[in-house]
Amino acid sequence: MKSRYKIVLLFLFFVSWSYAQDLPSIQTDRPDQTECPFITPKGYFQFENGFSYEKTAKGSNEIIAPTVLAKLGINDHFELRLITEFVINKENANQVSGINPVFLGFKTRLFEERGIIPVTSFIGHIGIPKLASKNFQTTYYTPEFRFTMQHTLSEKQTLSYNLGAEWDGITPEPTFIYTLTTGYTFSEKISGYVELYGFLPQYQEPDHRFDAGLNYLFNDNHQLDISGGIGISDTSPDYFLALGYSFRFKI
């Protein structure tokens, strides 16, 4: 049975590699918090899978194992998106686990990069309250949106940033989001980034964080990433670590 799985995986790996010859390398929204403005190629499924561990100073932690962002390229300007997360929350001796509300959404290209105008896209999601484990269901729908922008600084370096807001499904107050990251390509296979990002609740203290990470491109359709970060504000977690694997294939 194991040998059959290996054959299937090798087959999918080869097919996805052969289809990628006329496409740019896979562009992902992970591992940084800055969503990228690029659209999944038409007729491709893309899966961005990750595992993360977040530690706070109050003896609690959160494990997401896994988070999956599934994308389907509709055309050169539009993709459909689906986000699922299995979460384990632990606070002292108490532990709760389950599926967060499933998010449905889209990304659409708004502007191409021209001079000082960055390539710009809009991302919108909405969380479905009842599409979740009982302990993680929300009272209301949970919308979120971002404008995601990127400048090309050189052949090897980019500057990207997001602005947006999200709602928690419990209160009507939004939490505003900002991200700022610079990415650098070290070689054909390896790239990295450093990033500052944060969450600004309407009536609570802000949560600012810093992180960095590396990507390894196996081929144009398969990418491995590793990242980690620290909290800057009193309300932030102590640190987090994450590992991810992303791939795409033509349907």
Image (tube, rainbow, N blue to C red):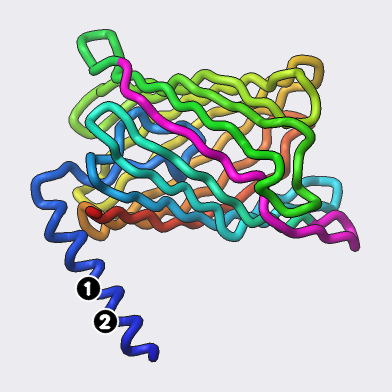
Q: Is residue 4 left or right of residue 89?
A: left
Residue 77 is one of the magenta-drawn residues: no
- Where is residue 188 drawn, in percent x and y? 19, 49
Tell me the tag on residue 11: 1
Q: Are marks 2 and 1 in contact (CB under 8 Å)?
A: yes
Residue projecting furthest to the front: 130
* Residue corresponding to mark 2: 7
Image vertical order of residue 136 relative to residue 150, above or below: below
Q: Amino acid at mark 2?
A: Ile
Residue 92 is one of the magenta-drawn residues: yes
Crowdedness near tag 2: few (<14), some (14–19) or many (≥20) residues, C-alpha within 10 Å: few
Q: Nearer the viewer, residue 73 or 35?
A: 73
- Occupied quadrant, residue 143: top right
Q: Nearer the viewer, residue 247 or 129?
A: 129
Q: Amino acid at mark 1?
A: Phe
Q: Residue at x 26, y 60 (%)?
A: 218
What is the magenta range?
90-110
Residue projecting furthest to the left: 22
- Where is residue 9 drawn, in percent x and y? 30, 74
- Where is residue 106 drawn, in percent x and y? 43, 32
Crowdedness near tag 1: few (<14), some (14–19) or many (≥20) residues, C-alpha within 10 Å: few
Q: Residue at x 17, y 60 (%)?
A: 17
